Image (cartoon, rainbow, N blue to C red):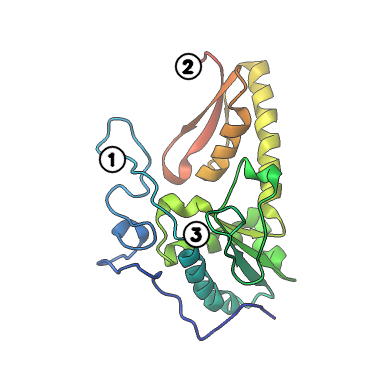
Amino acid sequence: MCASFRPSDKPGPAPGSRRSGSGGGPASGGGFGGGGQGSGRPATHGSRYERRPAPALDREGVAASLRRYLDVVVPAMHFDVYFKIEIPRGAGSAAAFGESAGNTVAPAEAEFESPDIIVDFAGPDGELLLERGAELLKALEHVALRSVRLDPQLHDRVRFDCANYRADRIAELKLSAQVAAQRVRETRVAFRFNPMPARERRIIHLVLKDQADVRTVSEGVGEERQLVIYAAGSK
């Protein structure tokens, strides 16, 4: 049914991480890329919280920890799926894991997303991961990255994918950005997207960054943060 599974492996803290008090999440210290006060908080001008520089990513260590975690969790889901974990060529190291040697990120995607680690799912039940806007795939990614105690600032450098979902989503966001920008040009009324994660807001920012007649702004806090397109010169 599933390739790459070793049920005897148990998920646990990533190599080199340390447990810290209660809670144990990435923001409480330890784990890949460290942690500490202010970790994962949005940058706020003039506040006492300042976004610290993103730490270095231990690609091989994170990939190995994700494999151990998923080798236990995926069989327990009772889905007929398997996964492979890869480090794309050019992402710091050419080393790869499982069946992934030599893979790269497609040039059309690389401008918008250049992940250091890709966890790719396939199999007859893969479509279940993609239902409701890939809700289960996204939840699995979120829980896995927290379980290996990866610094929140590094979460966007790991991509969970299935059936080329991320490439399709990037194409969808690019089209949405162009359509919304044209609407703003014609109406001079701001267009507000539904809340979306930072990696998806970034794609829209990049699509429209060279269009002088509109500007893009991220507004809101946390999971409710939205991208807004304004006509140039508007307040």
Left or right of 165: which side holds 117? left
Name the residue that disc number 1 marks.
49
Q: Position of residue 162 (x, y in %)?
A: 67, 60
| Secondary element type, mark 1 | loop
Type of the residue with mark 1: Tyr
- Could you say which is closer to the camera, residue 81 or residue 183? 81
Name the residue that disc number 3 marks.
142
| Secondary element type, mark 2 | loop
Picture quadrant where residue 82 is located: bottom right
Give the CA separation, mark 1 to mark 2. Answer: 26 Å
Name the residue that disc number 2 marks.
235
- Could you say which is closer to the camera, residue 152 or residue 32? 32
Q: Residue at x 49, y 61 (%)?
A: 59
Q: Residue at x 27, y 67 (%)?
A: 22
Type of the residue with mark 2: Lys
- Could you say which is closer to the camera, residue 23 or residue 92? 92
